[in-house]
Amino acid sequence: MIYRILRKGEVRVNKKRIKPEYKLEAGDEVRIPPVRVAEREEEAVSPHLQKVAALADVIFV
């Protein structure tokens, strides 16, 4: 994800776009954009699997 942000030119050093190979130097001013991480949606479990799991609990408990 970080490499993608650098590659797209969203990270700026000294108000200029930089390449991913750029090495920071003392006194460089870095601007990093806000990064949003998508939350994962819970996968729906089929009712059949829920019944099987419930039966397994009954049998093995």
Image (spheres, rainbow, N blue to C red):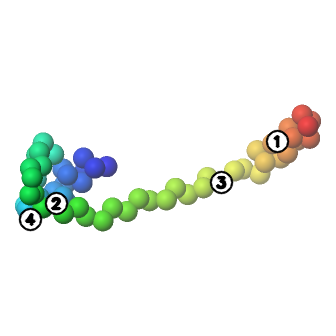
> Mark 2 or mark 3, which is nearer the start of the sequence?
2
Q: Quadrant of residue 59?
A: top right
Closer to viewer: mark 1 or mark 4 = 4
Give the alpha-carbon distance from disc 1 to disc 2, as whole Å: 54 Å
Indicate the secondary structure of the residue bearing disc 2. Answer: strand
Q: Which residue is mark 2?
A: 30
Residue occupied by mark 4: 15
Q: Callout 2, which amino acid? A: Val
Q: Which circle marks residue 44 in the picture? A: 3
Q: Position of residue 47 (x, y in %)?
A: 77, 51
Q: Could you tell whether 36 is left or right of 55 in the image?
A: left
Write the residue at 20% across / 52% down: 6
Q: Tell which circle, 1 or 4, labels the residue nearer the N-terminal end.
A: 4
- Disc 1 marks which residue? 52
Q: Secondary structure at mark 3?
A: loop
First along the sequence among labels 4 and 2: 4
The type of residue carrying mark 4 is Lys
* Element type at mark 1: helix
Which numbered disc covers residue 39?
none
| Image coords of residue 27 (percent x, y) | 8, 57
Q: Residue visible at 25% across and 64% down?
A: 33
Q: Is residue 41 left or right of residue 13?
A: right
N-terminal of the pair, mark 3 or mark 4, is: 4
CA separation in Å, label 3 and label 2: 42 Å
Q: Residue at x 78, y 48 (%)?
A: 50
The mark nearer the N terminus, 1 or 2, is: 2
* Eye-nearest disc, 3 or 4: 4
Residue 36 position, x and y percent, is: 37, 62
Q: Quadrant of the C terminus?
A: top right
Q: Is residue 48 visible?
A: no
Q: CA distance from mark 3 to mark 4?
A: 46 Å
Q: Residues within 10 Å of mark 1 (few under 14, many from 20)?
A: few
